[in-house]
Amino acid sequence: MEKKTAIVTGSSSGFGLLCVIELAIKGFTVIATMRDTNRSQELLNTAKEKNLMNSIIVTPLDVTSSESVREFKGFLEAFSQIDVLVNNAGFAVGGFSEELSVDDYRKQFETNFFGVIAVTNAVLPIMRARKQGRIINMSSISGRFGFPGLSAYSASKHALEGYSESLRLELGPFGIDVILIEPGSYQTNIWSSVDRIENNPDSPYSFYMDRIFKEMSNGKEDYGDPYEVAALAAQIASLPGSPDLRYPIGKGVKTNLFLKKTLPWKVIEKVVLKKLKP
């Protein structure tokens, strides 16, 4: 039987790196993509430690570049099958909407949303020809629940959720599953851009930012091990039958989603604003 092949975007660190390793352990040949392959050393060192070097292929891919995606599509012509695509590449823009530029939002969407579409469309003809495949989109609790100071990130993940719902219905007749993983807060570098925000004392939102930084700082001890998310992705990739659409994961995530589903928004709003009150 021909060995199955998986693609992981944004695999130089965090969830992406761990997804590559876990998929390789599951027996996949994994195409590990990243914008800068000079940042592949941590992945390669981990692969060497686990004797997985023969199962991992590192190749460049900038999901925001049409030329890069086009070159990647040409690279895939050497593969007779692509069984799994993990759309993981992403980052988080932090800041309040009034103080962010439209370009800030565009940059956020270029990676977290349009990049997913570009890579998915590059891979789909291969999956469709074989009438099988799985597309795992790395979403977030922020794709289901907005939070102050994260409007750009949350908007991009909400868009990803809607896209994935539609795509799953479009691709079902071709034997292709679309799955959303919705992590809460984990120990990855995705929040580094948020951590670097300077709290301008002249900003009308300064009091908000103080409380948000405090909440983030207090909560870091409870951030989950990103291995849990990678292990879930590898499990979904290998499941018999058709997986569910959504897989929320992380401390408090299912509780928050249940509360949003059952409580009036005004109640949720009061709780969040009270928590962030100076």
Image (spheres, rainbow, N blue to C red):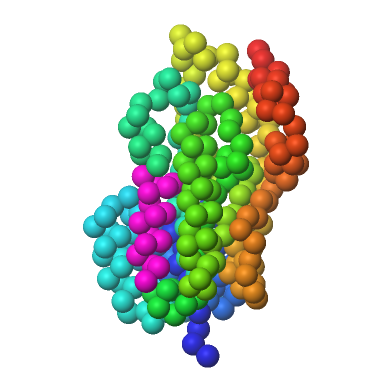
Q: Position of residue 143 (x, y in %)?
A: 56, 42
Can residue 44 be seen here?
Answer: no
Q: Position of residue 258 (x, y in %)?
A: 74, 41
- Please report the residue visible at 70 percent of the width from the left and 36 percent of the height from the top: 260
Q: In which image quadrant can residue 15 be found?
A: bottom right
- Please report the residue visible at 38 percent of the width from the left and 52 percent of the height from the top: 115
Can residue 199 be seen here?
Answer: yes
Looking at the picture, does residue 237 appear above or below residue 2? above
Magenta segment boundaries in residue numbering: 110-125
Q: Position of residue 76 (x, y in %)?
A: 34, 73
Q: Quadrant of the C terminus?
A: top right
Q: Nearer the viewer, residue 255 or 93?
A: 255
Q: Is residue 107 left or right of residue 276?
A: left
Would you say the magenta stretch is mainly helix, strand or loop? Answer: helix
Looking at the picture, does residue 253 appear above or below residue 84? above
Q: Residue furthest bottom?
A: 1
Residue 75 belongs to magenta span = no
Q: Is residue 250 left or right of residue 86?
A: right
- Please report the residue visible at 58 percent of the width from the left and 39 percent of the height from the top: 142
Q: Position of residue 246 (x, y in %)?
A: 63, 55
Q: Nearer the viewer, residue 47 or 223?
A: 223
